[in-house]
Amino acid sequence: MAWALAVFLTALVFAQAVGRILGLRRRNIQQRAKLFGILGAEDAHKKKIIGFFHPYCNAGGGGERVLWAAISALQRKEPEVVAVVYSGDTDATKEKIIDKVKARFDIELSPTTLHFVFLQSRHLVEDSAWPRFTLLGQSLGSMWLAYEAMTFLIPDLFIDTMGYAFTFPVVSLVGNIPVGAYVHYPTISTTMLSRVRSRSQGVTNSEVISSSALLTYGKLLYYRIFMYYYAYSLRQARFLMVNSTWTKNHVDSILQHRDLFLDVIHLLPPFIGLKLLSNRQSPREAKIVYPSCDTRQMAMSPLEGRERIILSIAQFRPEKDHPAQLRAFHKLLELYPEYRGSVQLVLIGGSRNVDDATRVENLHMLARELGIRDHVQFVVNASYAEVLRWLSRASIGLSTMVDEHFGINIVEFMAAGVIPVAHASGGPLLDIIVPLNGEPTGYHATTPETFAEAFRTVLTLPKEAELALRQRARTWAVQKFSAEEFEKGWDESGWRSWLFR
Ligand SMILES: *[C@@H]1O[C@H](CO)[C@@H](O)[C@H](O)[C@H]1NC(C)=O
Ligand SMILES: *[C@@H]1O[C@H](CO)[C@@H](O)[C@H](O)[C@H]1NC(C)=O
């Protein structure tokens, strides 16, 4: 009885929604005409629209740089395509945003093929709106935001550049258009899920009171359902780009994620519609498209005449593990005392607050304890020009952070011709310090001993080999993280075939 009622109600809601969606699609013809009118576009029937979903488009961070670089390339290569950015920056205007992009990133945007749709309900995706069940709340919020976007304008192709995968089913359903995405970071990862799972097993094995076991089970179920729908949403995309190997590994494993129990549940009547929707041509894996790094300034420094300086550029945050840098340097001087006095360690970094300042103090102390204080220099809050100067003098670039997702400082070392020695993990291992034509572009290490040996290797390189290595590191970094490579990556992602179907 209750079952029949549920099915009936679902059908009713469904019918309502279908009516609305059809209404929206009909109205969209006028909305498009209006947009082309505003832009003063001729031959409107030839135009195509790509909608970029980026509610925080005016934030000025790395994610925004990717968005604007992509749109700028699009404007250059496809004059018949209009880029529409769905933004929640209701306090900004088109002119202000274009100016800020120019000032912040030195990227030119043409106003003639760019338009903004300002969304009113961005607060729904903010953490503060969802003190509890934040992930779920934000995801539902993003679905509503995408629906709002579609009520303003349905594009010909929808590309999410902020990682709101839950918008994909909404847009597919409401707009009946293809969806793609550039993903910086997965919302939830399979490792997170297995961590919760192993904890729940830990709890059941121990003699903890059952209520907390129940809580953990509840949490596990929550994550499981969330992951199920996240994977489902990601599979609605026709093409997926990611910003690094790290993100690719996570996204690929989510695309493969299966949950038999939840699959079976979704064969029941109220859910079966979702199952039918999911038979799309989703990609099996994501494509890596590295964001471009602006290395022009670094690439101008001379490769010859380097001083015996080991340089670290990292904010004084705990995860950067500056103590490991001091220990590695100490080990070098211990193993090879002849370097005492002739090799210097320079730590450059921003100190944002009291905690950072305390960390710097502690580093001073550690350096004194290790007896290397006279050979270590701290440069706090250096200006950009100062950083460039150090980059043009140093021999070795040091990074000790474990599992760094990327490591733009290492790209900068390499572009400047500074030979990198970095912890063997994360982006530095997988993406950045990788061989060029079978020859090294830098070194990896894990312990003070291995770091010290890597320093030693660089310091004893014959002159010609050293110069070749600096040149190789530069060539590699400048080319791999260039704007051209970034644009090529977008081209190869296949978005054109989905727009010009
Ligand atoms: C990818 O995005 C994440 C999250 O914003 C960031 O931490 C990481 O550095 C990015 N990777 C690259 C290659 O820019
Ligand atoms: C570094 O800059 C921050 C603010 O950006 C400031 O609070 C701090 O005092 C500065 N530290 C030093 C040593 O200049």
Image: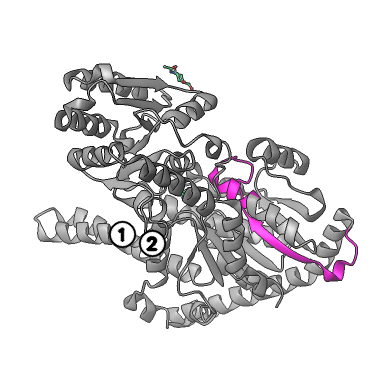
- Neighbour class for label 2 at 10 Å: few (<14), some, many (≥20)? some
Rendered image quadrant of residue 332? top left
Residue under numbered circle 1: 191
What secondary structure is marked by label 2? Answer: helix
Is residue 323 something that shows in the picture?
yes
In the picture provided, is 303 more to the left or to the right than 338?
Answer: right
Nearer to us in this view, 61 or 4:
61
Could you tell me the amino acid type at mark 1? Thr
In the picture provided, is 310 more to the left or to the right than 41?
Answer: left
Could you tell me the amino acid type at mark 2? His
Q: Position of residue 432 (x, y in %)?
A: 41, 51
- Membership of 338 in magenta stretch: no
The correct choice, above or below, for 416 with respect to 347 in the image is below
The magenta segment is: 41-68
Residue under numbered circle 2: 250
The correct choice, above or below, for 6 with respect to 60 in the image is below
- Neighbour class for label 1 at 10 Å: few (<14), some, many (≥20)? few
